Amino acid sequence: MNEIERPDLSQVSPEVRAYIEALEAQVAQYESDQPEQVSAVPQEPPTTINVISASQQGRGKRTPRHFYGRQRRGGMGVFDLETDAPDYPAHLTLADENEHLLLISNFGRAYRLPVNALAETPVRASGQLMVGDLSLRENEHIVGMLPADSGTHLIMASQRGWVQRIPRSYLGKSLINGMAFHNVKEGGQITAVCWTPGDGELFMATVQGKGIRFRESQVSDRGCLGLRVDVGDEVAAVTAVYGHSSVFLLTYDGKGTIRQMPTFLANKAPGAGGKMVMKTEKLIGALTVNEGDDLFIISQLGKIIRFAAADVPPKEGAVQGVNCMALRNDTVTAVAVAYMQSNV
């Protein structure tokens, strides 16, 4: 049965809204109490692709992807990275065990780390400190964790909408860990990163659910304003797209939608104000997805869920989204996409 979109209740009387929300809470409680059937037997052939999760303070772990069973969208997930408060899982990516990770800090500094430098662990494990040898500065922390060398250019987007385009050659094996590629005085601290193929477009989205799309080639070597961000808002995500692409958007409360780019028109140039892409109080991430891909979501309490991106109905307009992960006194912190087949 197709899931009905939750309507906008802002104009409904407080009494009716409270009644509806109480019913929703009871339904969510019932669904979360149902045992999730996750097979202990791998559902795909053994692979060298690892799911890598890392905490806010840089404690990370890796586990082969095939040990994460695919669940239904809206399930509770399973426990993954163990952390102690106030630290919590904050980053999620997938990479081959023989590759490197590229870590980007809020100051725009870059670090390379071999994936196999992290010990392979079971799904539920505490991991190890990743950033101990990176010489992070005071108030510096990792904001982006990507498989290295996975595109022609790295895009860095700052909290106030400044965007930079860095050739992959600058970030290769000769990279000096800690090399800076961004001036914090120009646009503020880095909040989002992604790889691009170099010949498409960029989609940027803010915490409050506003976004913009423009040609990547319009970003100059020294960078430019990509999105004019409203006061009190900041950039939450950036991803590479084409005119036919679909983008998965995820909120802090576990709701997600797939926004189709053909109905989100590109701007003639970067630097304009954003248009509404999703109705939310707090957008967590935006990732380009293709048919056949899987999505991984991790929560603040360390639960992780894997489900098919096809389980999320695509939409042509701004919606509140559908439940992607059952949460109880928890919030979503990160999302990653698993490319399950060769994508063009």
Image (cartoon, helix red, strand yellow):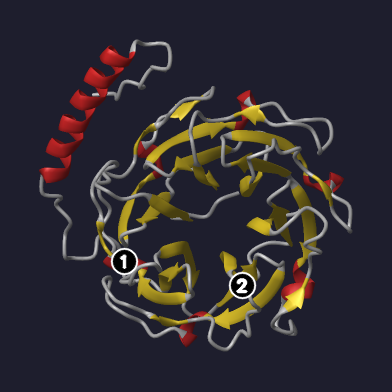
Q: Residues within 10 Å of mark 2 (few under 14, many from 20)?
A: many
Residue at position x 19%, y 24% in the image: 23
User: Can residue 181 be seen in the rendering of this structure?
Assistant: yes
Residue 219 percent coordinates (x, y): 84, 49
Label 2 with label 1: CB-CB less than 8 Å: no
Q: Quadrant of the N terminus?
A: top left
Q: Which mark is residue 102?
A: 2
| 67 to 71, vertically: above or below | below
Q: Residues within 10 Å of mark 1 (few under 14, many from 20)?
A: some
| 292 to 280, vertically: above or below | below
Q: Which mark is residue 66?
A: 1
Q: Nearer the viewer, residue 222 or 66?
A: 222
Residue 178 percent coordinates (x, y): 71, 80
Q: Amino acid at mark 1?
A: His
Where, by quadrant of the figure, is residue 151 drawn? bottom right
Upstream in sequence: badge 2 or badge 1? 1
User: Can residue 295 be seen in the rendering of this structure?
Assistant: no
Where, by quadrant of the figure, is residue 145 drawn? bottom right
Residue at position x 29%, y 76% in the image: 125
Circle 1 SS class: helix
Q: With 76 as the anchor, is 34 left or right in this view? A: left
Q: With 17 as the anchor, is 281 left or right in this view? A: right
Residue 29 percent coordinates (x, y): 16, 38
Residue 306 percent coordinates (x, y): 33, 53
Residue sitting at the far front: 14
- The number of discs equals 2
Where, by quadrant of the figure, is residue 296 drawn? bottom left
Q: Amino acid at mark 2?
A: Leu
Residue at position x 56%, y 34% in the image: 209
Q: Which mark is residue 242?
A: none
Q: Nearer the viewer, residue 116 or 279?
A: 279
Residue at position x 42%, y 46% in the image: 292
